[in-house]
Amino acid sequence: TVMLTKFSPYIYSASGASVVAIDNKIEQAMDLVKSHLMYAVREEVEVLKEQIKELVERNSLLERENALLKSLSNNDQLSQLSTQQANPSSTSQAQTVIAQPPQPTQPPQQPNVSSA
C-alpha cells in the first residue's frame, strides 16, 4: 500500500528499496546536470579569457599608436583635438586635425625570385 502524507518528503511503499532507487536516480541526474554545467562554464571561461587577452593586446597596441601620434603632432593640433572632444558638434574639423600615420621610410623589399 502507498501512504502519502503532507509532511513526508518521500512516497513510502511496501519496500523501502524503491525509495532508495529513486533517490539514487535523482542523485545521478543531478550529478550529470552538474557536470554538464561545469563543462559549459569552463568552456565559456576559456573563451572569455581568450577575448580578454586579445583585448588587452589590442589596447596596448592602440596606446602605443596613440603615444606615437601624440609625439608626431604639434601642440596646436593637440589643443584643437581636445577642443573637438569637448565640443562634439564640430566633427568635420576633427577629421582634418587628426594626423595621418607615418609611412614606412624604408623601401619595400623585393621578393627573392630566382630566374630559371
Image: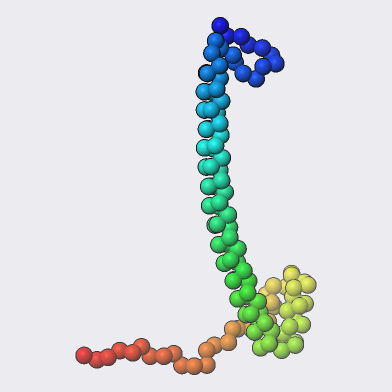
State whether residue 99 is above or below residue 59. Answer: below
Q: Is residue 18 above or below residue 96?
A: above
Q: Residue at x 64, y 80 (%)?
A: 64
**Front residue of this view, candidates 23 and 36:** 23
Residue found at x 27% / y 91%: 114
Q: Residue at x 65, y 76 (%)?
A: 63
Q: Nearer the viewer, residue 80 or 22?
A: 22
Q: Residue at x 64, y 84 (%)?
A: 68
- Height in image: 87 above or below 70? above
From the top left corner, tell me how far across and down residue 51 is, in percent: 57, 62
Of all residues, the one furthest to the top in this rendering is 1
| Residue 98 in view | no
Q: List x then y, in percent, for residue 18.
A: 52, 18
Q: Position of residue 1 (x, y in %)?
A: 56, 6
Above or below residue 61? Residue 20 is above
For the rendered model, the colour scheme is rainbow
- Image quadrant in which you'd find residue 79: bottom right
Q: Position of residue 93 (x, y in %)?
A: 69, 78
Is residue 11 at all visible to an observer of this figure?
A: yes
Say which quadrant the C terminus sits in: bottom left
Q: Nearer the viewer, residue 89 or 46?
A: 46
Q: How many numbered markers are drawn? A: 0
Q: Residue furthest bottom?
A: 106
